[in-house]
Every structure is written in structure tokens, then in C-alpha cells.
Amino acid sequence: MQYDTLIYNVRIASMQHNAQPYGQLSESVVALLKGVIAGVFNADAIHSLSARTMIDGQQQWLLPGFIDCHTHLVYGGNRANEFEMRLQGVSYKDIALQGGGIKSTVEQTRRANEASLFKSAAKRARRLAEEGVTTIEVKSGYGLDNDTELRMLRVAKSLETQLPVRIATTFLGAHALPPEFADNADAYIDFVCDTVLPDVAHNNLADAVDVFCESIGFTTAQTEKVFKAAQQYGLPVKAHVEQLTDSKGAVLAAKYNALSVDHIEYLAESDIPHLAASGSVAVLLPGAFYYLHETQKPPVEALRQHNVPMAVATDLNPGSSPIASLLTAMNMACVLFALTPEEALRGGTLYAAKALGLSDRGEIKPGKLADLTLWDIESPAELVYTLNGHRPTRVFLGGQHV
Ligand SMILES: O=C(O)CC[C@@H]1NC(=O)NC1=O
Ligand SMILES: [Fe+3]
């Protein structure tokens, strides 16, 4: 058997659930063939294996490629002005109610053409990729009209053609109320369900559907309408829930077997059994908690007790979380939400994949995609312990060294 690549003399943090921290394996050789992990072998096997390319890992740590499972990285303009307003005490909610916030980015995104949206999104995606992110989820939600929502999703998908990353797209038409539907949220939800979503589905532009279920977003009744429409097109759902209030969005999401419930700072512990039953992933977004100067933390210990998988993502967006660094988000998840470094790293690999409904990546195991990163560190914890701008020494995407 000739492999494409053998990576040997490495310490492997597989992120599998085994008895070892970080899923560490005793093996130190990984064989890649046709874009997937073909096998994992002990050191002495190297003498009986052959491959076109042999890479000495020099005792560095090999991890699965990182997965950022929640971003809004396609958008026009920026909101630095609102950052200054918030620093002067104006709340995120008040800015939104004054017509700023998401609505302000919607105006700038509608004005931006596909080329300029691509250029700015590619810069953000490249920053994530430089830290070893190999899969990025990208949402729409700054168009709120048919043309711009579809343009955002096309731009998101086209990132794969220019960058060494895989893209998962999510339709988030139900992100905010556009001016054309001011004070008529129900009519806008009908427009999302009856006009935009069908167009998105017919053009295969989304892998999932998301809703901002919140006091300043959409109600659970409106959210459920979008979920039902998504089901009609065979699209899985996820939702921004309990970010600012306990609206019981997580309970509704669990009823629809949502891939994930995201933010969840105000998730009631009594609602967690619903998530344990549905298998939904709890996606923690510490960047938004940090930027909005939130005080209410997600119920991490209760999620742990109920064995609800927790993912960590950047929520990269121009308002509540302008962070293009998954390592920083992982550090914040530890410092602000008391995740362990192992939970944070598994939250940016295996459980991030689960939050996207992807079982082909996120751990080092035969049969999984050969999306891998190599790090010159003494222990995996270093990656989330220091904010020192870690960069992988090597990145593999589908077995190709990128
Ligand atoms: O402020 C923005 O532009 C997006 C904020 C982002 N969207 C959402 O539903 N929750 C968030 O934190
Ligand atoms: Fe978000």
C-alpha cells in the first residue's frame, strides 16, 4: 500500500473521546490517502510503510484543523462608531433601537457589490485560516432582501475557491427587521419563508437555517415559522437564543432537533435536559459577551453535568464580536466562561463540526478528512493559554499541505 503522505514523529491530540487528555494517542504516525486519514500507526511502523511524501513532525503536536462554527464574516462597512458609542455607555440594545446595529450594516452591505463583499470577507477568512482554521461557517443576514441575501451566500461559498478553507453556509434572513417591513415582523417572516428561503434552497446556497430569536430579534412563534419552512426544504436549523433574555428559544430549537443553540447566556438550567435529549450543541460565543460587556454567563457547569457538547466560535461580525481569531475566542471561553483548555479545543474541533452537522472532520481518526495542523508547542493547552498569536508550522487541507 502506498500512501500519499506519512506524517511521523508527532504527538497526536486527536480530540477523540478516549481516556487521555485532548484524545492524545500513543501512536505517532499518520498516513494520508486521497484526502482522508487512512491510518494511525506506532513509530516503528514507519519502516514498513511507504508514501510519496514523508514529513518529520519533529515531535510537534498534530491537531485536527480548527472549525469556526459561527461567523457573520460577509458584510459591508464597519461599526467602529458604535464601538465608541458603547464605550460612552450607550447600550447595544439602544443603538439597535435607534436604527443602528445590524440595520446599519444592512445598509452598507446592500450597497456593496459582490467583488467588494468578497474582498473584505476574504481578508477576514484569511486571518482565521492563518491560525489553523480549515472549516468556517458563514451566515447571511445583512441583506434582509432577496438579492442581497443570495449575494452574501454566493460570496461565502466562493471563498472556498480562493482560500485553503472549507465553507459551510447558513441562511439567517431572520436576523433583523428591514426598513421595508418596519413594525410588521410577521409580514417579514412570511417574506423570508415564502420568497427568500425557497430561492436559497433552489440555488443550494445554504447548508442550514438560523434565526435571531430574541427580544430585539424575532419571537418564538416567528422563529417556529422559519423552522417549519426550513424543514420543508430539508434544511437543518440552528438559532441565536437566550443572548440577552430568556425567550425559551432553546426549548423550541431542541423541539426541532436544532444542530446548535448559540450564545445561550440566559439559558435556564431547567431547559438544559431538552438540549441533552435533542443532541443540540451549545455554541459559546464569548466574543459577544466580552464586547457587549455582558454579565450573565452561560450555564457551563450545568451543560457539563448534562453532557451537552459545547462548541466555541468567534461570532465574527462588525457589531457584537469583531474578532477574527478563534484562538482568542477559545482563550475567552476559558477565562470568561471557565471552560478547560481541553473543552475549548474540542469546542473548536469535534463539537464545532457537530454544531454544523458534519461528522467527517474535527478529530484525528481513520476515515476523517485529512484537515490537520502542526504546532511547535509543549502542550495543546498553550494554544488557548497565551494570546501570543500562535501560528501552525504546517496546515493540511484534505491531505494537501497548504
Ligand atoms: O451586531 C451585529 O451586527 C450582529 C450581532 C449578532 N447577531 C446576532 O443575532 N447576535 C449577535 O451578537
Ligand atoms: Fe451570531
Image: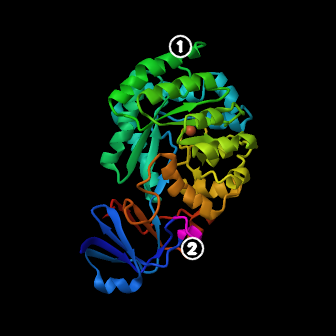
Amino acid residing under circle 1: Ala
Q: Which image quadrant: the N terminus?
A: bottom left
Q: CA distance from mark 2 to mark 1?
A: 53 Å
* Mark closest to the chain's N terminus, 2 or 1: 1
Report the disc number at residue 368. Answer: none
Left or right of residue 92: residue 21: left
Q: Tell me residue 15's x, y (percent).
A: 52, 64
In this picture, is 144 found above or below 389? above
Q: Which residue is mark 1?
A: 187
In this picture, is 57 found above or below 236? below
In this picture, is 254 found above or below 98? below
Residue bounds of the magenta highlight: 16-23
In this picture, is 142 found above or below 262? above
Please tell me whether mark 2 sits on a helix, a strand or a loop: loop
Mark 2 surroundings within 10 Å by alpha-carbon count, few (fewer than 14), some (14 through 19), many (20 or more):
few
**Can you tell me whether the CB of the residue at mark 2 lies under 8 Å from the nearest atom of ligand 2?**
no
Determine the residue positioned at 60% across, 38% down. Answer: 254
Determine the residue positioned at 55% across, 69% down. Answer: 18
Amino acid residing under circle 2: Ser
Q: Tell me residue 173's x, y (percent).
A: 49, 27
Q: Can residue 116 be seen from the camera position used here?
A: no
Queried whether the magenta region covers residue 55, the answer comes back as no
Determine the residue positioned at 58% across, 42% down. Answer: 278
Q: Which image quadrant: the C terminus?
A: bottom left
Q: Which residue is mark 2?
A: 379
**Quadrant of res 53:** bottom left
Q: Tell me residue 20's x, y (percent).
A: 58, 72
Principal secondary structure, stretch drawn in magenta: loop
